[in-house]
Amino acid sequence: MSALNRVISLLERLRWLPSALIACSLAGCLSRGKPEAINTSFVNPAEAAANAFQQYDRNADGRLDAAEMAACPGILAAKAGYDANNDGVITSEELTSALTAMYGRGVGLTRVTCIVTSGGRPLSGAEVKFIPEPFLGTGILPANGTSDANGTATVAIPDEQLPANQRGLHSMQPGIYRVEITHPSLKQPAKPQGCEVNPSVRDGNVITIKL
């Protein structure tokens, strides 16, 4: 290959570099090898499932029923997707399988929009907090946002908690969360609700919270 052809080939490769970097940043691949960065190995599915059953399986029968799931709003909200055989309970194997599918996609960050309504109307100025369920471990960071006039909030990890190469993405980690809403019109914080933030949802997750 001539020197001119080698230069042309190099320029063709560099032409795709910016978009590739953006894609890698969203997927967490820029963080590989950097322990301080968001990456895709922040949850061990088997360990997380074992932690969940240790915390919530009160009768130690190896299944989470509706009453036990009530203590974990995130799992309760995702029940339909986790109860593979539709028997009304979730086993450790079902939870492990669901978490493996979630984190096996190699996505470190994903976009989340939360729509908050009160009495059927958009609630402006609501403080929205997504708090990871504790059984996932310490690798999941909380995320927050404030709803606009349409009741819509972009929920994200604060930039100061992210490595420099992932700031400004306005995203959060996949996971199982409890959602807390506070607003001046509410006499007390609303009862926590739950949700799953799944990276398989195209164009980001849209979570609706009705007060």
Image: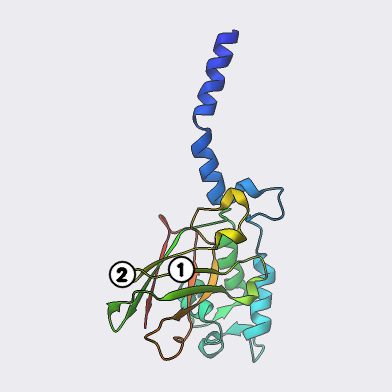
Q: Quadrant of residue 109?
A: bottom right
| Count of numbered tags | 2
Quarter in which the C terminus is drawn: bottom left
User: In the image, 20: left or right of 34?
Assistant: left
Which residue sits at x=63%, y=71%? 136
Q: Is residue 118 left or right of residue 109?
A: left
- Judge the density around disc 1: few (<14), some (14-19), many (≥20) Cα neighbours within 10 Å: many
Frontmost residue, 172 versus 51: 172
Residue occupied by mark 1: 145
At 52% from the left and 16% from the top, the residue drawn is: 8
Query: Around disc 2, counting alpha carbons within 10 Å, would you say few (fewer than 14), some (14 to 19), or many (20 or more)?
Result: few
Q: Which residue is mark 2?
A: 149
What amino acid is found at the position of numbered circle 2 in the picture? Ala
Residue 187 lies, with reference to residue 97, above or below; the image says below
The secondary element bearing badge 1 is classed as strand
Q: Is residue 1 visible?
A: no
Is residue 150 at least partly visible in the picture?
Answer: yes
User: Mark 1 and mark 2: span between their CA atoms?
Assistant: 13 Å
Tell me, for residue 107, which label it has, or none. Answer: none
Q: Residue furthest top?
A: 2
SS class, disc 2: loop
The quarter of the image holding the N terminus is top right
Residue 174, relative to residue 14: is it above or below?
A: below
Q: What amino acid does circle 1 point to?
A: Gly
For the point 45% across and 75% down, the residue is: 127
